[in-house]
Amino acid sequence: MRFSRRAPEPIHCHVIPPRHFTGWAALYFVLFVCVPLLGAGLLLDVALYTVFRDLFDACYAIMCLFE
């Protein structure tokens, strides 16, 4: 499908409006894409911090600045 700015063509005498983003689409994107990715990143960061602190006795990422 190509995207253009011209007026939509009628199909069987019906003009179908073009697609557009809505507030609900933005909400679904945040809830189903952004939040899970940020949650997975947070869990991975906590796991790596724990591994580096307990097993290797070393600082991890920005926590080196606070110790």
Image: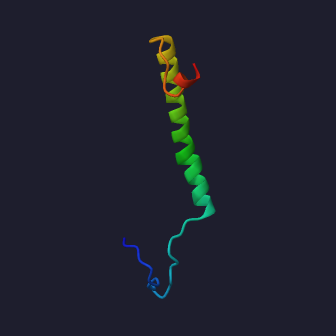
Q: Check the image and report above or below for 18 versus 33.
A: below
The colour scheme used to paint the residues is rainbow
Residue pictured at 58% horizontal, 53% vertical: 28
Q: Check the image and report above or below for 53 versus 34.
A: above
Front position in the image: 36 or 65: 65
Q: Position of residue 52 (x, y in %)?
A: 47, 17
Q: Position of residue 26 (x, y in %)?
A: 58, 57
Q: Check the image and report above or below for 22 versus 34.
A: below
Quarter of the image with the N terminus is: bottom left
Residue pictured at 53% horizontal, 29% vertical: 43
Q: Position of residue 18 (x, y in %)?
A: 50, 75
Quarter of the image with the C terminus is: top right
Count the numbered circles shown. Answer: 0
Q: Check the image and report above or below for 32 versus 48.
A: below
Q: Position of residue 30 (x, y in %)?
A: 58, 50
Front position in the image: 66 or 44: 66
Q: Residue furthest bottom?
A: 13
Position of 66 compared to 12: left or right? right
Front position in the image: 38 or 18: 38
